[in-house]
């Protein structure tokens, strides 16, 4: 793939990366990776642990410089003024734990060039929004891990950035606060913000992202609209709830994989197999309470794409003369 200049026809894009590569010694963390993120999108940068997501984000932020390739943010190479339009929540948290919450947030937002008067109003607004106003004058070290995560998030968006980059943003949050943060992200996106959302938790992606890029071992595996990606993998998943024994599930000729939880099962059919054949077999053995053919989840696709590659690698690794 060529690493030439990015097309001039990129006004609708917040981020464009072409053929970016990053090596650390003999290890290639990101290899020939290209993607484009439209303005106003919530974009999922996905992959298993160690896939190269954080390295990619650090290149977008100009924390790391690509060894090869081109990155543009809002049609520009990264510069100090452009960085003020970006909010970045890193996976590794960095806070001044002896500082009070208010002092920490004021310090961070002043670094982004926001005047003190306006900053104070925004700090109060956000603390109220996430339910931490009563902790405003407490030291950060006195907050729980989840509270600290919410403060980190406020610090990321306090200066009203146009592009918000979040690396594992739900880390440390309980389900209630996770839902609250999801609602805030949707609200920010509806106001025109572009959001890059990096995670290995697929359930979060399905609720938020419209466009995804899945990478594994530094290389792109699949990219596109989430709905299109799911359509590509067909409708060969079955959810079934039943009363009675589960002997009808012993059909390896029909069923590729299964997760059985008592009288409830999630099944993946072999390609080309008709779920109705399984239904007929089930009706002869047990009482069916629910039988539904569904799209594969993103988690199913993730496991198929990433898991199969790892299995292939393991097979190759065990072959004589293959390195």
Image (cartoon, rainbow, N blue to C red):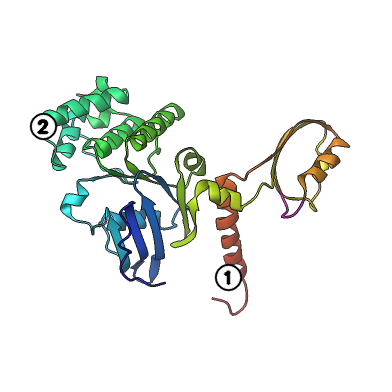
Q: Is residue 7 left or right of residue 295?
A: left
Rendered residue at 83%/38% (across/down): 282
Where residue 13 sits: x, y (%)?
A: 33, 52
Look at mark 2 in the image and give the residue it sits on.
Answer: 116
Task: Answer whether residue 138 is visible to the viewer in this image.
Answer: no
What whole-number distance in Å separates the C-alpha atoms at marks 2 and 1?
59 Å
**Viewer-nearest of discs 2 and 1:** 2
The secondary element bearing badge 1 is classed as: helix
Residue at the farthest top position: 134
Magenta stretch secondary structure, dominant? loop
* Image position, residue 138 (x, y; %): 22, 25
Eyeballing the image, is 51 above or below 244? below
Q: Which residue lies at the image location 74% right of the left edge and 54% below the top edge?
A: 272
264 or 85, nearer to the observer: 85
Report the span colored magenta: 269-273
Which of the two labelled residues, at mark 2 and mark 1, occupies the earlier sequence position? Answer: 2
Residue 136: tell me if it is visible: yes
Q: Secondary structure at mark 2?
A: helix
Q: Which residue in the structure is indicated by mark 1?
A: 317
Density class for disc 1 (Cα within 10 Å; few <14, some 14-19, many ≥20) is few
């Amino acid at each position: 793939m060529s690493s030439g200049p990015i097309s001039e026809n990129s006004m609708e894009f917040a981020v464009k990366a072409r053929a970016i590569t990053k090596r650390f010694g003999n290890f290639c963390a990101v290899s020939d990776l290209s993607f484009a993120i439209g303005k106003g999108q919530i974009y999922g940068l996905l992959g298993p642990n160690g896939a190269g997501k954080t390295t990619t984000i650090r290149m977008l932020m100009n924390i790391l410089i690509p060894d090869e390739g081109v990155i543009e943010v809002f049609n520009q190479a990264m510069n100090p003024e452009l960085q003020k339009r970006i909010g970045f929540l890193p996976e590794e948290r960095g806070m001044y734990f002896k500082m009070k919450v208010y002092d920490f947030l004021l310090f961070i937002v002043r670094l982004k060039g926001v005047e003190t008067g306006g900053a104070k109003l925004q700090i109060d607004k956000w603390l109220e929004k996430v339910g931490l106003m009563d902790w405003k004058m407490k030291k950060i070290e006195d907050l729980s891990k989840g509270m600290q995560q919410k403060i980190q998030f406020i610090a990321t968006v306090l200066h009203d950035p146009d592009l918000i980059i979040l690396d594992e943003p739900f880390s440390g949050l309980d389900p209630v606060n996770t839902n609250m943060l999801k609602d805030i992200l949707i609200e920010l996106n509806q106001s025109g913000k572009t959001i890059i959302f990096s995670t290995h938790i697929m359930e979060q992606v399905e609720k938020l992202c419209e466009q995804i890029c899945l990478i594994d071992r530094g290389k792109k595996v699949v990219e596109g609209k989430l709905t299109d990606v799911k359509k590509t993998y067909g409708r060969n998943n079955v959810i079934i709830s039943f009363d009675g024994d589960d002997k009808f599930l012993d059909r390896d000729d029909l069923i590729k994989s299964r997760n059985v939880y008592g009288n409830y099962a999630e099944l993946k059919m072999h390609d080309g197999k008709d779920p109705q054949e399984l239904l007929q077999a089930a009706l002869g053995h047990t009482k069916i309470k629910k039988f539904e053919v569904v799209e594969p989840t993103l988690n199913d696709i993730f496991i198929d794409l990433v898991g199969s590659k790892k299995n292939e690698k393991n097979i190759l690794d065990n072959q004589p003369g293959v390195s």
